[in-house]
Image: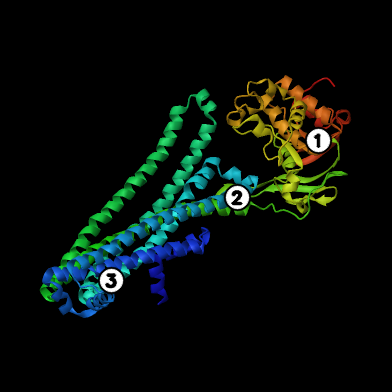
Amino acid sequence: MKKYIEKIMEATKIRAVIRLFSFVEVRRSEIAGLVTFVVISTLLEGVGLTLLLPILQYAEGGSSAIQNSGGFYWEILANALAVVGLQPTLVVLLILAFVPIVLRNVTFYLKTWYGAVVSSRIMLRLRMKVVDVVYSADPEFYTRHPVGQLVGVVMGQTGTAGGAVLSVINLFGTVLLLLMYVAILLILSVPLTLVALFFALIVTAVNRRVLAWISKNALKNARLGQKLMGKITERMGQMQLIKLRFTKDQESENIREVSETMRGLGIKASRVGASVEVIVDPVQMLSVFATLYIGIAVLGSTLAQLGLLLFILLRLNAKVKEFNGAIRGITAAASGITLTREMFDAAIESNTITSGPQNFEPLKRGISFKNVSFDYPDVYNAQGELVSRGKPVLKGVDAEIPVGSFTAVVGRSGAGKSTLVELFPRMRDVTGGTLQYDGVDIKDFDVKSLRRSIGYVTQTPMLFNDTVYDNITYGLGYEPTEQQIRSAMEAAHATFVYDLPHGLETQLGDRGVRFSGGERQRISLARVLLEDNEVLVFDEPTSALDSESEGYIQQTLAELHGKKTLIVIAHRLSTIVAADQLLVMDDGQIVESGSHQALMTKGGAYAKLFESQMIEMVDV
């Protein structure tokens, strides 16, 4: 018995439906509403079909034919007409048959409208569920999931969820109609019903062979679409390089190759679907002819019975096709849900940074690293294939950063500097040792209060395609005064914005493309200074700037020196020679620490970096 139940569940895709509802948030009230409409529509369909038999009997032999037929239909009809005092005339019978048709269509309208409402709600809930998890994912998650793929899943694949749930509900309605048709057929004739069911099973068996192909290739097509979305987004983001290298033909060809593969799968899917129709339609018509032959030649059914039987068989065959089509649709939609689930699970798995109970308070003593280490883990894709091998980056780092000090982190590329500063706002978690603020482990702080208390300036300014005002007030949490904004702009040497025709309402363009690198960096710095945080982290803020812009950043650092706790990564010596201490990193370790003069006198790793011009030499 268990074996047969398993086969039924697989054939009807019940397992896929269970997996779908376990991931997609569907409320009971929504299911109840949709099911109610489906049940009412089914009952009205049954009543309408039932009332066709008296009409056919009337056409065959008048009202006496109805009364003489007796049986189930006449009893119900006679009692109903007696209640309202009507006679079974042709007009009365036609009106009685027409009313359920009208009501069924009204119900269909309401069901379609409510279905669209529920479908859009489900899509929105799933989309926001995935967005929230993706936004919470650790930085490592974004290194193995291109932005284009994320957008494709969030905006594309989540859209299939609402439709998939609606298809499941409609499938339930189709099953109810099939059961009702079978019940009416059984009342009319058991032998003829068995003949019709035999052919229906043949159609279902043919459909099952197609489902395996759809299940396999729909997922393949969805993965290709995800890959294509990622490729296009990435390439569009580097349009300047494509134009400089004049590789537009090559890039177009790459997109064409993937698109051609997807086109081929789409054509094959259409061919497979068409082949099913080629087989199914003749089989279904054969079932109608076989049933009519047996009814006429063997059972001697009346014309009214045969007319109703023929009508129901045609409706039954249409619903069998609809049922099998719905199963195919659910199977195809499941591929989108699978990709969404993979992305969701990957984001959940990567989100290892959890908030602590303590709010971050202003520093009183400073920051300390105690035997801190950090390892990148092995990374696998959704298919379990190794994407990148993990490696240790930081190894036993010990350091003290006093409150209000200016600390510079220097070293060769790949020494672990950027990874080190990413630990301050807990963008990454240490894998060994502890990072403490005033003696409190960083993991004990609420992540939101910690990150909102640390200003972070990166090498590449983080700007949106929005106005200057919206960029500098992004995530601020309050409405700043004009004086607060101007003070921040002055401190960042970004007052050039006020000379523009639209001032703070000037649009920056994509990633601030309408401004120079130095101007973008100063706008980004103004946002950080407007927050007025006590701890400021600068990850190579001047590495790509001209000397004038670099000078402005240096002036800002000099003005903040002693007022804020500054942590700066820099290759250019001119940016960090005034630091209270330099932490020299090599191969994930701090090999030297001290002031510029002390380290130069020592003649160690820092002096070698200086002499080899890995740090720009300036007069001090």
Pointer 3: what residue?
A: 182
Q: Position of residue 311 (x, y in %)?
A: 21, 64
Judge the density around disc 1: few (<14), some (14-19), many (≥20) Cα neighbours within 10 Å.
Answer: many
Pointer 1: what residue?
A: 566
Quadrant position of the C terminus in the picture: top right
Give the Cα separation between the discs numbered 1 and 3: 79 Å
Give 598 or 269, whichever is nearer the viewer: 269
Horizontal side, residue 568 vs residue 298: left or right:
right
Between circles 2 and 3, the one closer to the viewer is: 3
Above or below, 498 against 306 in this view is: above
Q: Amino acid at mark 2?
A: Asp
Give 448 or 388, whichever is nearer the viewer: 448
Give 580 or 600, whichever is nearer the viewer: 580
Between circles 1 and 3, the one closer to the viewer is: 3
Q: Amino acid at mark 3?
A: Val
Q: Position of residue 212 (x, y in %)?
A: 37, 58
**For residue 132, which numbered disc appears in the image?**
2
Q: Secondary structure at mark 1?
A: strand
Q: Position of residue 71 (x, y in %)?
A: 21, 80
